[in-house]
Image (cartoon, rainbow, N blue to C red):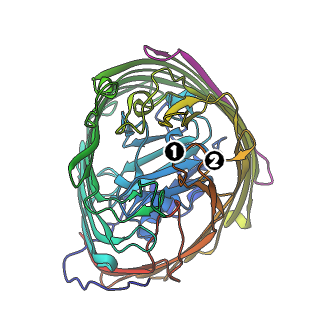
Amino acid sequence: MLKTSFVSLIAIAAATPAFAQTDTQAAANDPQDAIIVTASRSGEGIELKDLPASATVIDAKALDDRQTRFVSDVLRNVPGVAVNRTGGTGSMTQIRIRGTEGNHVLVLIDGIEAADPYQGEFDFGTLIADPSARIEVLRGQQSSLYGSDAIGGVISYTTLSGTEAPGVSVRVEGGSFGTVSTAARMAGVSDKFDYAVSGTWFHTKGTPTARGGTRDIGSDNVGTTAKVNWKPSDNFKLTGVLRYSYTNAETNDSESNPASPTFGYTVDTPGTRFSNDAFYGLLAAELTALDGRWTNTLTGQFADTTRTGYTTSGVGYGDKGQRYKGSFVSSLRLDTGALVHRITGAVDVEREQFRNTTPGSGSPFDAFTGKRTTDNLGLVGQYELTAGGFTGGASIRYDDNNRFADTTTWRVQAGYRLPTDTRVHAAYGTGVKNPGYYELYGFSDGKYIGNPNLKPEKSKGWEAGIDQSFLGGKAEIGATYFDSTLTDEIYTTYPAPLFVATPSNRATDSKQHGVEVTAALTPVPQLRFDAAYTHLIAKENGVTEVRRPGDIASVNATFSSTDERFSTTLTVRYNGRMTDVTFTDPTYATSPVVTLKAYTLVNLNAQYKLSPRFSVFGRVENLFDVDYEEVFSTATPGAAAYGGVRVAF
């Protein structure tokens, strides 16, 4: 179905303001010159081209060029990343890295752990893109730096400071499916102080998400952030961050009547929706000494989330969770000429607490509604070395947990750049993921009950890659092979005779291996191509795991006029065949697995500056109106067009 209604808007709208030229924004000229911070606990960045690990940086210019509205959409261009949205815009969206599960990815927003403490993972359907931000994706086991969750990797989303992106900007747009979105940002800097305040709102009436359905599934999404930095002296800085996120999204359920021919299929379910409220905060104090070579940072942060699902009769499920975390990091850089050493130690003290607010249905389920807490102490040691063309390091972490077994994780990595502009790199690491509280204590109307005896999942794996630069840095190609094994994987069983869903730890291993290939070409300053390809084999005990495409590829081509007034970006994304469970068997124990067909989506956008401050833009998504599914029996939008205006001061 093709819906291409345009909403004509005459309003003040925003382009991203001219950025200060910082290390962060240097990537706008060459992404390989980007600085990545997530790969070290020291807080000091390293150039992406020298990092002996697999990572991707998406800077503010790329986010703007691709007219990103939801962060999950731009992550589809990252090698090793698969995205599955379980409904309409704003619905539950999972990110899988290198074939791991959606809850195996640690998510940081402005340095704050953002996962729902109860669900045990972050819902990317709730993260709309801010006007000026950047993304770092660090792939591979990173638990030695960050503890639980970082089995597949780390995704760090950071809004830019007032120093990095000063100015005032506003954007308004509208388009297909009754969609309207706005964004505004105000940021500034003085001698000792900088600030940035931004807000984004996205509304859509949506499209049907049931095969043959007629009920449009819409949503409202709000995101606001305030960030301040105060530097009263050259060696002392205070940073504060506050963020609020709100999502109210309609949903559809699966047919629950075993006698129905559509049992297990997504069907129109009027009145069903969910809301998600999340508050985040961070306060950090940084003190440097020895001419900046010794850095000490004390940080406190919190996350407070509330998620509630509704039916026509009222609340169907819900949960509340809080995370409080304090960290102290001390990092010393020793520069001895040809050798640069960095030694970092960190202490993380964390408390998670939660309450299941799902209405009880009688014993034994009411026993799962009590408030519970988990405390964790993490001790981190990291060593990094740079010696000419060599970069390497090692990290180790010990976690003392009052609910689960204490765990030690570690990682080693090294890379070397040859005189031929060839770089080789390799790494080996281990990871851990503690069970989510829903897996431990969740329940749903007698159809699901948690298992308090679950053990943490554990992972180990290695990678090796090679990168080659050509034409004086105008072209680059890279390939990385990875291989991981997951033990004690948590999965859902349906034991007879009641067939009530219950999570358990597998006795068999889950294995993932594959190849990531990246390429970049800038033949002239006005034209840039970026491409990524991933081939993945993910199997559990020899059976292919669901919602993990065997092949994923993307190409982004951006052209800008010589006067930079006009720019256009063409995005082509290929998602290969993948399997999914249908749950069409009434016992759920033997529900068949189906194959979802491969698909290719094409997006095209353009923007034109009418003046240095005022511009217009537009885009078409799913240009060729492709019919596809990311989740079994869940329909997706057809072709759509959007347009708007923006202004910056």
Residue at 37% across, 61% down? 19
Three-letter code for the amino acid on which mark 2 is drawn: Arg
Dot label at residue 102: 1
Mark pair 1, 2: CA separation = 11 Å
Which residue, given by chain and number where applicable, does mark 2 sit on?
98
**Does the stretch in magenta take in 407?**
yes
Foreground tag (1 vs 2) = 1
| Disc 2, SS | loop
Residue 308: % across, % down: 26, 45
* Label 1 CA crowd tier, 10 Å (few <14, some 14–19, many 20+): many
Viewer-closest of 143 and 499: 499
Q: Does residue 415 show up?
A: no
Three-letter code for the amino acid on which mark 1 is drawn: Gly
Magenta segment boundaries in residue numbering: 400-421
In which quarter of the view is residue 199 placed?
Answer: bottom left
Residue 376: % across, % down: 42, 18
| Disc 1, SS | helix
Residue 181: % across, % down: 27, 69
**Does the stretch in magenta take in 397?**
no
* Label 2 CA crowd tier, 10 Å (few <14, some 14–19, many 20+): many
How many numbered marks have been drawn onto this rendered protein structure?
Answer: 2
Where's the C terminus, which quadrant? bottom left
Residue 451: % across, % down: 46, 26
Where's the N terminus, which quadrant? bottom left
Say left or right for 144 vs 300. right
